[in-house]
Amino acid sequence: MKICVIGTGYVGLVSGVCFSELGNEVVCVDKITSKVQLLNKGEIPIYEPGLKHLLAKNKERGNLRFTTDLPDAVRSSDIIIIAVGTPSQPSGQANLSYIEQAAKEIGQSLNGFKIIVTKSTVPVGTNEKIQAIIEANSRYVFEVASVPEFLREGTAVQDTLQPDRIIIGTTGEKAKKMLVELHSPLTDKIMVTDIRSAEMIKYASNAFLATKISFINEIANICEKVGADVTQVASGMGYDKRIGSSFLKAGIGYGGSCFPKDTQALIQIAGQMDYNFKLLKSVVEVNRDQRFNIIHKLEAVMNLSGKTIAVWGLAFKPETDDIRESPAIEIIQDLLNKNARVKVYDPIAAENFKQTFSLDVEYSNSAIECAQDADALCILTEWKEFQDISPKTIHSCLRYPVLIDGRNLYSEVEISETDLIYYSVGRPNMNKGQREQKPLLSF
Ligand code: UDX
């Protein structure tokens, strides 16, 4: 099939590359010339395992190209996929201006029957608006569909090529037939639904996953008080098929480009319909508070003013250079507000962080260099590289042996072999010093 993808952000680029991998003829469009030039050279503007290889392979085969010429790309394709950004406005509402602009340009470029698919996450009813905009700008017949994307950064290629399910929201008979055919090499779990339900499935899925995370984080906070272990609690819960074990990892809360934006947007959508989504509002509030528990734990053992705090991990999760809404941002800001000196290290995301925030932090070239002579180390992202460094090594680097593990990287056995003052999330106290006597609190 001939496919045009508009927008080469995470969703657009990964979708375009993966559809070309399936043997389709794909053209990806972006307004930013430098980005298109980069992609045409076989380079990718994001860090995403496996993507660069597939892009190069399919460019070489001749079934993937990149252009700034939207009208030409639309005219030469049968299926047009809209994958432009829908960033949050200050109110939490999704900004649909890129979508509306894309719809207008598509309408002006149509030269025959096409199927217009929206992959961007959009509020319920948006596909109907897209339909109206295209109709106002074109005399050709077309059908619209909502096919929401569920890929995760870091595993985006795998998620796209082996999805749990495909949701196709459309009432168009041709759209249904062609989109089922397009996606059937990926999975047999294809659900065809009406457009509004498809739009809602995306928001409801992300809101539910965010709810699981905030739920387990609150359970973790209670575990700390009652002396239970949240990792065991989550395992025990996860065996129940009705609950499932995924997305029950306690930590410092969720970040990224989707959960924070989509939860806020769903609260707004509900509000506009005079519905107060109390549960989701609490999920967001719990998530905001959770990150500051790192600071509370540090402050339980030291006065932060004048101390050197090492931070491992800036990305909102491992295997990505994405720092959007990363809990690390506010944690570091708070440390600086409390007059701590902050050293940071991230295997991939440091450059992004440096370019985005002009924060007064020191960037280290390695995890060890970062921890060296610090008064405490905070782990904020569970990079494998960190897990491979033993607590003994960490202990030997630090000036004062405080380790705050926001991702529960280490086991009780590993920690018990050291004299670290160790705090993790929702697990019983593992501190040797604390088991035997009170830790040094007057530092
Ligand atoms: C998410 C959805 O998973 C995906 O379906 C959607 O298309 C986009 O949003 P992504 O943001 O890439 O994907 O990452 P994800 O792996 O879902 O993690 C999101 C955040 O939740 C991260 O900050 C992660 O650290 C956190 N998380 C995840 C937890 O704290 N605990 C968990 O158990 C799982």
Image (cartoon, grey):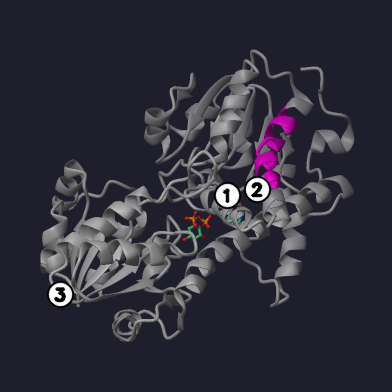
> Which residue is disc 2 drawn over?
284
Expressed as whole percent of the image width and height from the top left, the position of residue 21 reads 24, 71
- The residue to which callout 3 is attached is 112
Q: Is residue 291 magenta?
A: yes
Relative to the observer, which residue lies in front, 435 or 270?
270
Q: Earlier in the sequence, mark 2 or mark 3?
A: 3
Three-letter residue code for mark 2: Val
Q: Nearer the viewer, mark 2 or mark 3?
A: 3
The secondary structure type at the circle numbered 2 is: helix
Q: Earlier in the sequence, mark 3 or mark 1?
A: 3
- Quadrant of residue 142 in the image? bottom left
Give the image quarter of residue 225.
top right
Which quarter is ligand 1 in?
A: bottom right
The residue range painted magenta reads 285-298
Reading the image, the residue beneath label 1 is 264
Q: CA distance from mark 2 to mark 3?
A: 45 Å
Q: How many marks?
A: 3
**Upstream in sequence: badge 2 or badge 1:** 1
Tell us which disc is closer to us: 2 or 1. 1
The alpha-carbon separation of the residues under discs 3 and 1 comes to 38 Å
Left or right of 418 in this view: 167:
left
Secondary structure of the magenta portion, mostly? helix
Asked if the beta carbon under badge 3 is closer than 8 A to the nearest atom of ligand 1, the reply is no
Judge whether 392 appears above or below 298 on screen.
below
Q: What is the secondary structure assignment of the residue under circle 3?
A: loop
Amino acid marked by disc 1: Gln
Residue type of the residue flagged with mark 3: Gly
